[in-house]
Each structure stands twice: as C-alpha cells, then as structure tokens.
C-alpha cells in the first residue's frame, strides 16, 4: 500500500516545491504567477464556493460522461457490426470531432437559452463520446472470426454472441477510451462554465477570479479542477479493475 | 472460381476422418460447410441423415487458435457451449461434465486458472474439452495441433486417441501433418489443389489401440510414403525428380 501511494505523493510534493522555488527565485508577484503557498488561503477564503461549484462541475461532467458512454457504446456497436454504417458514419464522426468545441458554445446557448445545466452536460457529452465510439467500434470489428464461430456453430443468436463474447472482449478497449473521455468531459464542462455568461461551477469561479484580478483564486481553481480530474480518472480505474481486471496480466 | 469442386467425402458415423491437402486448397471451407457456418453454392452436406441447412447444436469445433475467453476460468470456458445448448441444465451437472473431460485430458487442478496462466498445449487441451462438453455427434478439428511443438503435439495425439475411446463422436480432422493423419485417422482423405476435389482416400487398417511406436512400423511407413506421393501430385508436381 505504502509502495503504491508514496511515489505519486512524492512526485506531487516535488512538483509543488519546484513551482514554489521557480516563483520565489524569479521574484514574481502573485499577479504574474501565484505560488503554491498562495493557494491554501485562497481555498480557505472561498471554501463554500469551492464545495458548491466543485460539486456542480463534477455532477455535470459525470452526467455528460454517462451520456457519452451510452451513446458512444451504441454508436460503436453500429459501426463495429456494420461495414456500411462504418463507411457512412466515420467521416461525419471525424468531422464533428474536429470542430473546436468552443465554437459550439454560442450555438448551443442560443438553441437552449438559459438551460445552463443542460447546455453544460450536452457539451461534456459532445466532447467525450468520440473516443468511446471509435474504440468500441474497433474492438467489435476486429473480433477474430473464430471467437464468433465457437458459439455461432452451436446456433447461438447474434445477441448471445455479443453478450458472451464481443462485449466482454471489448471491455479493455472501452475502459481505455473511458479514461481519455473522463478528462475530456471536464474540458467540455468548463468550456461552457467559463465562456457562457452567469455560468456556474468551477469555470465560473475561475472567471470571477479573472474579473476581480484575484490570481491566487484562479490558480486554486485550476488545482481544484486537476484534483477532480484525478478523482474521476481513478474512479474509472476502479471500475476497470472490477469489470476488466482479467486483462491485467500482472495481477493474475 | 469455386474453392471446392467435385468434392465427395463421406465419413461413416463414429469414425475418424483426417483430411490433408496442399495449403490453401479449401480445407477450412470444408469445415465451415460441415459446421453449417457456410452454405454450399451447389451440392449438399448430409450429417447423420439430415441435410445441413445451418448451424446445429450437435457440432463441436476446435481450431489451431484455442480461442479461450480470457475473462473466464478454464472451467467456465469448457462450460460455455452448455450455456447455449443446454441452458436449463443444472449448474452442478455442467460442472461435473466439464470436470470429467478436464480429468480425461489431465487438466484436473487447473480448472480455476485463467487461460493466460496455462501453456499452449494445456490451452489446446482445454479447447478440446470445450468442443466435446455438449457431447456433439460431429467433432470438427481445424488443425488443432498445428501451432504446438512436436513433442506436445504427440502428447495431444494420444489425448485425442483416449478421448475417442471414451466419447462417441464422428470426427473430421483437418491437418498438414501426415503422421498425425495416420495415427489418428480411420481414413485419410487427400484433397487436390484448388479447386479441391477428393484425390485419394486411404483406409488406415491399423489396430484401434495405437501407440506412437506404430508410426515406426514398415506398414505405417508405406502408408506415409503413399500419402506423401499423393500430396506431391496434389501440389501439381509429379513424383519424378523429388
């Protein structure tokens, strides 16, 4: 246990120490770059705001991510099982993914005026479903035919083959994509929170720090976001251990 | 161009047919036809008095790749066909049946291991158990020993021989190994190059109780020699000069 926790903890401390040293050595004032020692007072002063806004950011990110899982998996199944669907949908998917999502913020806030929670969840979803769809699609389409044949030769239905073979076999790829998507979803949430007026969540807190010239607060928000990102990432790892732990050869 | 053309093979119930032929001659297509995974463009496949129209529960398959499911234990891998063929069978009966086979192939004590924890030969043994667990009438073996080293392969031939003694099934074995075909087969069918037809059929009239030593008898050597010549012809090269 100690061996698992000590190295990452040490790395974080080392990072904070060199950050502090960098600011101190250059004699930067905190409006140029806040140092780690400026952060605890900032957190403390706005602790209620951090809790409520952090929660807003977190639940909207998770909601968006869950939508992305459902939609991405369905999309992955469609492109994984049908060649025609794959050829037809890939250009659309890639094109959509290539659009910078910041440009979509004014679009969706005009379509769904005032629906702030909905808009934020929608953005988190839109930015994060792509990796899931692609990896589930690839996982299903690259399934070796023999795996299918052992059940198909017994007259098993397509659904049975999917449930017993294709789905579990795709889980490692799925979780790999989910780790990427989890961090992407945070970017989507914060995009809306920062860009749209009268936002909520940590993004809005960041924005108010900027407006008020409260630089330590801005850095504190960034650290809080990083913390939430790590939290969600490890939640995904935890689920992966439960559902796809077999793919981990070391653990046995 | 058809893969198989004018191919006539008939395998008596309960016997073991080994099919050999040059690579790419359509042996795997033959297994797919027998398994009902593919429909012939022309002609018919009969199995136990019934025309094969599609997949059927009375077929067992094993491939060169053991295709074990990594997220299941060896025991659960062996049980898999029963989940499809006999969904109502009590769990205890399924386990008992799987353990019986695992015992026969010498995998007792490994039933809770993951496939990745086993050697290649052991994985192939487990794969054989899975192909037999639902007591199929016909066992289709598509080069199941092809990827194993020579000694492991010979071990598995003997396992296969013992399984045959214990379980009643008709077997079609696709192989590239002539010694394997003589050791295991009741008849050896040589296919010609593409499009494959039946080129030669040899009855193997060696005693049922074969040991590996039988491959070193003059009789077996004669058979191997004849088969070798037939393969050469199938490859489109005459015996002369080789």
Image (tube, grey):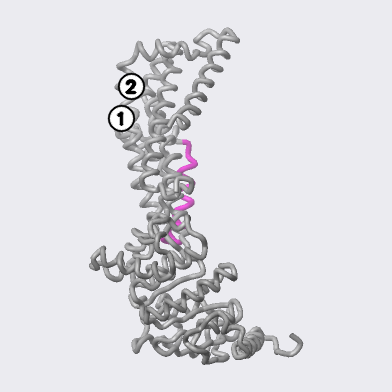
Q: Quadrant of residue A181?
A: top left
Q: Is residue A92 magenta?
A: yes
Is label 1 in a helix, a strand or a loop? helix
Residue B174 location, x and y as percent? 52, 78
Q: Are marks 2 and 1 in contact (CB under 8 Å)?
A: yes
**Residue A198, numbered circle:** 2
Q: Is residue A100 visible?
A: yes
Q: Which residue is mark 1?
A: A116
Q: Residue at x 57, y 91 (%)?
A: B200
The boundaries of the magenta stretch are: A80-100
Whether residue B176 sits left or right of residue B72 in the image: it is right
Image vertical order of residue B17 relative to residue A9, above or below: below
Whether residue B64 sits left or right of residue A182 in the image: it is right
Nearest the camera: A186 or B192?
A: B192
Q: Quadrant of residue B136?
A: bottom left
Q: Residue at x 41, y 47 (%)?
A: A245
């Amino acid at each position: 246990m100690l061996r698992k926790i000590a190295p990452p903890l040490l790395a974080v401390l080392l990072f904070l120490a060199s950050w502090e040293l960098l600011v101190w050595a250059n004699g930067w004032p905190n409006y140029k770059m806040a140092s780690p020692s400026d952060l605890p007072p900032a957190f403390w002063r706005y602790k209620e705001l951090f809790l409520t806004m952090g929660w807003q950011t977190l639940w909207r990110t998770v909601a968006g991510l869950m939508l992305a899982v459902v939609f991405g998996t369905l999309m992955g199944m469609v492109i994984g099982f049908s060649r025609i669907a794959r050829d037809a949908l890939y250009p659309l998917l890639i094109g959509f993914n290539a659009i910078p999502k910041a440009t979509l913020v004014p679009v969706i806030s005009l379509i769904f005026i005032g629906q702030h929670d909905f808009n934020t969840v929608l953005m988190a979803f839109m930015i994060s479903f792509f990796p899931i769809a692609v990896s589930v699609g690839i996982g299903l389409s690259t399934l070796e035919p023999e795996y299918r044949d052992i059940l198909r030769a017994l007259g098993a239905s397509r659904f049975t083959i999917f449930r017993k073979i294709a789905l579990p076999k795709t889980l490692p790829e799925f979780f790999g994509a989910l780790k990427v998507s989890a961090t992407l979803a945070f970017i989507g949430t914060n995009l809306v929170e920062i860009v749209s007026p009268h936002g909520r969540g940590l993004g809005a807190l960041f924005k108010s720090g900027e407006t008020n010239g409260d630089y330590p607060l801005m850095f504190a928000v960034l650290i809080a976001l990083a913390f939430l990102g790590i939290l969600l990432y490890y939640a995904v790892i935890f689920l992966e251990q439960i559902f796809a732990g077999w793919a981990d050869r070391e653990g046995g | 161009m058809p893969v198989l053309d004018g191919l006539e093979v008939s395998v008596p119930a309960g016997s073991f047919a080994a099919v050999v032929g040059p690579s790419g001659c359509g042996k795997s297509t033959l297994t797919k036809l027998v398994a009902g995974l593919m429909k012939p463009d022309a002609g018919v496949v009969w199995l136990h008095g019934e025309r094969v129209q599609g997949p059927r529960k009375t077929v067992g398959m094993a491939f060169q790749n053991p295709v074990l499911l990594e997220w299941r234990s060896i025991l659960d891998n062996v049980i898999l066909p029963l989940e499809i063929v006999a969904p109502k069978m009590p769990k205890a009966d399924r386990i008992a049946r799987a353990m019986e086979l695992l015992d026969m192939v010498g995998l007792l004590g490994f039933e809770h291991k993951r496939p990745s924890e086993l050697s290649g030969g052991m994985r192939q043994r487990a794969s054989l158990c899975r192909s037999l667990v639902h007591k199929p009438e016909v066992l289709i073996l598509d080069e199941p020993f092809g990827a194993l080293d020579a000694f492991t392969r010979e071990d598995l031939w003997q396992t296969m021989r013992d399984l045959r003694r214990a379980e009643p099934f008709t077997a079609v074995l696709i192989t590239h190994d002539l010694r394997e075909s003589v050791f295991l087969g009741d008849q050896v069918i040589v296919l010609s190059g593409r499009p494959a037809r039946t080129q030669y059929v040899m009855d193997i009239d060696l005693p049922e109780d074969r040991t590996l030593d039988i491959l070193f008898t003059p009789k077996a050597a004669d058979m191997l020699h004849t088969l070798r010549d037939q393969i050469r012809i199938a490859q489109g090269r005459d015996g002369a000069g080789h």
